[in-house]
Image (cartoon, rainbow, N blue to C red):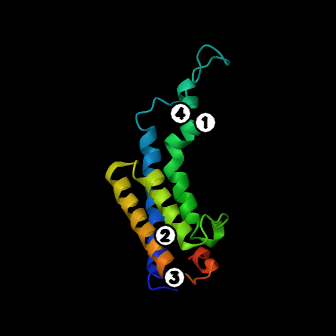
Amino acid sequence: MSLLDMPARALGITAAVATLVVGVVHAINSFRGSTASLQWPKAGWFDETNESFSEAFLLTPYQIAKHWQPLLLGLIALGQHVRVVHVWRIYSNWLQATLWYLFLAFFGCLGFTGDLGIVAGLICLVASFLALCNACLDRSAHPSALTEPLFA
């Protein structure tokens, strides 16, 4: 266990929460100005009058990424630190954690929600740097200590 172990883990959960906040704000902003609304058809039961609504909520990969990508990545990142939802292990050593936080910064934060995304991305990059420092300093660490969730 190195000196940077707990600060890196604390910054990791901070990065996860920051990404989650970016995801919520982005999801709200991505639907702002949308013409997606439900309308009751006046002509009959089978007229297509809600195309704009169905277009906004399509489950195509593009639409999912467009609206929900930072939120989903934030939930997955937060799941690494909470035992109740700790289903998938994204990383099991510090080098993998370094790559995960780099991925989180570039694909979950930096391109979304303006300054908030930049600040969250910087937090992810610092978490990645601390994980890299731990990878270099602590070669004897047992992998399960890193992947053990912080919160029960």
Is label 1 or label 3 in front? 3
Q: Residue furthest left?
A: 115
* Residue bearing the label numbered 4: 56
Compute the Cα span from label 4 to label 3: 47 Å
- Residue 20 visible: no
* Residue bearing the label numbered 2: 13
Question: What's under tag 4, amino acid-wise?
Answer: Ala
Label 4 crowd (10 A; few <14 / some 14-19 / many >=20): some
Label 4 with label 3: CB-CB less than 8 Å: no
Q: Is residue 97 above or below residue 43?
A: below
x 58%, y 59%: residue = 76
Compute the Cα span from label 2 to label 4: 31 Å
Compute the Cα span from label 2 to label 1: 30 Å
| Numbered circle sitting on residue 96 | none
* Residue bearing the label numbered 3: 138
x 51%, y 58%: residue = 74
| Numbered circle sitting on residue 60 | 1
Badge 1 or badge 3: first in the primary sequence: 1
